Image (cartoon, rainbow, N blue to C red):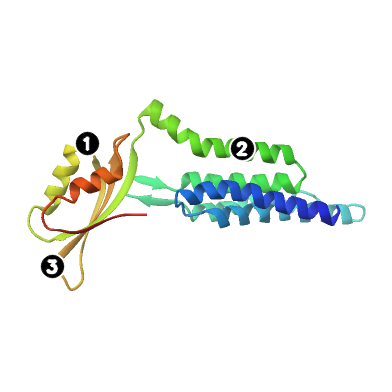
Amino acid sequence: MSIYEIIFKLVLACILGGMIGLERESLNRPAGLRTYTLVCVGSALAMIVSIDIYLQYYQTVNADPGRIAAQVVSGIGFLGAGTIMREGASVRGLTTAAGLWVVACIGLAVGAGLYIPAVSTTILILFVLIYFIKFEQLFTGMREYKGLVMVVEDRPGQVGTIGSILGDMGVLIKNIQLNRVENSDDLEVELLMEIPSGMKISQVIDELSEMKGLRSIDRLN
């Protein structure tokens, strides 16, 4: 394998991984542009090393060209697990974790010289990430989970008022956490909400902003 071929494979892996990572970065996901790019390039390098070792030693030892690369597929699970988070009744990060696994496979394909499958898979993954969520909303009326953190004056009925406002909007509270603000009589309310399809989080914020005793309201990333 020539040095130019190796460089081409690493650069191609960088581009393909970066394309998918850029889409994840635009949505502020736990793993973004740099993470996806590193995973794809690292996977390609692992495959290149596997093939190179096999070509050097296959005549003298019983070498397996896929042994090093095979560990990438299982090893990437540890990285993917770090992107999965549980919030109340929902689990976030599964798509990002699955994306990391697929990007690792794309890197392995590039390292093995399977350029057309690697590029085709990248295009398909981008299509799935960008357009399938629209299909889900169109055909299943999928609801979205959004988080808010509010600081309100601690007085009777505040939590009930929040629940009434959200209930009138058709928003379901999936999880709620209450914390006392240090050195203050205010209360921090952290909400995980299930928002109806077509409703924007900004509409919910506008409605909650009208309640009395509200100190601040912010989105949760």
Q: Badge 2: how crowded within 10 Å, few (<14), some, or many (20+)?
A: some
Question: Taking 139 as reference, is 174 left or right?
Answer: left
Secondary structure under the numbered disc 1 in the rendered image? loop
Q: Nearer the viewer, residue 129 or 108?
A: 129
Callout in the foreground (1, 2)? 2
Q: Residue at x 44, y 35 (%)?
A: 133
Q: Badge 3: how crowded within 10 Å, few (<14), some, or many (20+)?
A: few
Q: Tell me the kind of residue under disc 3.
A: Asp
Q: Residue 55: where, in percent of width, then height?
A: 87, 52
Q: CA distance from mark 1 to mark 3?
A: 30 Å
Reading the chain from its start, which is encountered first: label 2 or label 3?
2
Q: Which residue is mark 2?
A: 123
Question: Taking 47 as reference, is 140 left or right?
Answer: left
Q: Residue 66: where, in percent of width, then height?
A: 75, 48
Q: Which residue is mark 1?
A: 170
Question: Taking 59 as reference, is 97 left or right?
Answer: left
Q: CA distance from mark 2 to mark 3?
A: 53 Å
Q: Residue at x 32, y 46 (%)?
A: 146
Q: Which residue is mark 3?
A: 185
Q: CA distance from mark 1 to mark 2?
A: 37 Å
Q: Residue at x 21, y 71 (%)?
A: 182
The vertical placement of 117 against 151, above or below, is: above
Q: Badge 1: how crowded within 10 Å, few (<14), some, or many (20+)?
A: few
Instruction: Please identify the quadrant where the C terminus is shown.
Output: bottom left
The disc label shown at residue 46, or none: none
Question: Taking 158 as reference, is 88 left or right?
Answer: right
Q: Is residue 63 visible?
A: no
Q: Is residue 217 visible?
A: yes
Q: Residue at x 8, y 59 (%)?
A: 155
Q: Tell me the kind of residue under disc 2.
A: Ile
